[in-house]
Image (tube, rainbow, N blue to C red):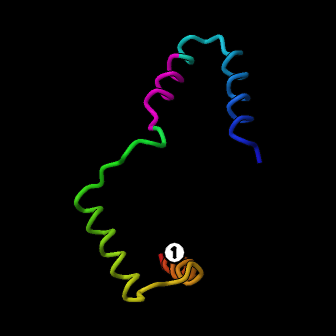
Amino acid sequence: MATVDNIRNGLIDKILSIKNKDFLVALDKLITSSSSESDTIELTKEQKIMLEMSEQDIKNGKLISQEAMDKRNLEWLNAM
């Protein structure tokens, strides 16, 4: 698996070879507008309620394994 430095250096090499100004401007906007790891995301009231409900489900043992959920999803899809 590539390290962050390897990925970054590979991207720099590719960017240096780009001659299309419009492409570079669009890439710059994309990079500038992307959120950094330190950005805080504000949750909506509804999202907070859903997280609280999830916490209650965990406390009350209302859990399902990933395998069981996959099985349910396949059954649901096959019923369509």
Residue at x 46%, y 84% (from the top left corner)? 63
Query: What residue sits 56% from the left and 78% below the top?
Result: 66
What kind of secondary structure does the magenta stretch mostly adopt? Answer: helix
- Tell whether 8 sits left or right of 77: right
Instruction: Looking at the picture, tell me which residue is in the foreground, 64 or 77.
Output: 64
Q: Is residue 12 above or below residue 47?
A: above
Q: Residue furthest front?
A: 38
Residue at x 49% of width, y 28% of height? 30
- Is residue 39 highlighted in magenta? no
Q: Is 59 situated above or below 49?
A: below
* Residue at the extreme bottom: 61
Residues shaded magenta: 25-35
Measured as percent of width and height from the top left, residue 13 is found at: 73, 22
Observer-nearest residue: 31 or 20? Answer: 31
Q: Which residue is mark 1?
A: 77
**Which residue is more in the foreground, 38 or 68?**
38
Residue 40, position as x, y percentages in the image: 37, 46
Badge 1: few (under 14), some or many (20 or more) residues near its Cα, within 10 Å?
few
